[in-house]
Amino acid sequence: MKPGIHPEYKPVVFQDASCEFAILTRSTIKTSDTIQWTDGKTYPLVKLEISSGSHPFFTGKQKLLDTAGRVEKFNKKYSKKQ
């Protein structure tokens, strides 16, 4: 590898803002936020909007959509006036 052309690969904490899910992994992402991890060390922090801790596919908590109401609303809004 050529020196000086690769980004720094370091430990980073990714934390889901909607739940208490956080994971410590390695990444090249740059951030100004930090967090103290359970081992007592301070790591860079990346805040996520959604992760496997809050995504409906992984949690099994699917939201039911009112598709019939949406179709009726669409038809009422865009139907031809007679």
Image (tube, grey):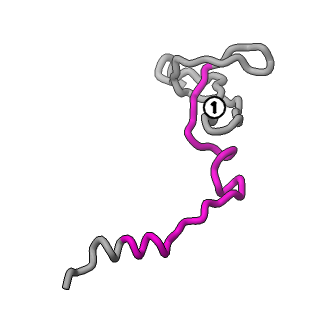
Looking at the image, residue 72 sits to the left or right of residue 14; the answer is left
Residue 75 in percent (x, y) is at 34, 76
The image quadrant of residue 42 is top right
Residue sitting at 55 percent across and 39 percent down? Answer: 49
Q: Quadrant of residue 12?
A: top right
Seen in the image, is 59 located left or right of residue 14? right
Q: Left or right? Give the position of 4 relative to 61.
A: left
**Residue in the foreground of this view, choosing between 65 and 4:** 65
Secondary structure type for disc 1: strand
Q: Is residue 81 above or below residue 53?
A: below
Q: Is residue 49 magenta?
A: yes
Quadrant, the N terminus: top right
Magenta includes 64? yes
In the rendered structure, the answer to whether residue 49 lies left or right of residue 58 reads left
Locate residue 52, reporting x and y percent. 67, 46
Q: Quadrant of residue 33?
A: top right
User: What's the residue at 64%, 55% (across, down)?
Assistant: 56
Per the rendered image, the range of residues in magenta is: 44-73
The residue type indicated by label 1 comes to Phe
Query: Which quadrant holds the C terminus?
Result: bottom left
Q: Position of residue 9 (x, y in %)?
A: 60, 24
| Residue nearest the viewer, comparing 43 with 60 | 60
- Point 71% across, 34% down: residue: 20
Residue corresponding to mark 1? 14
The crowding category of the residue bearing disc 1, from other C-alpha atoms within 10 Å (few below 14, some 14 to 19, many at least 20), is many
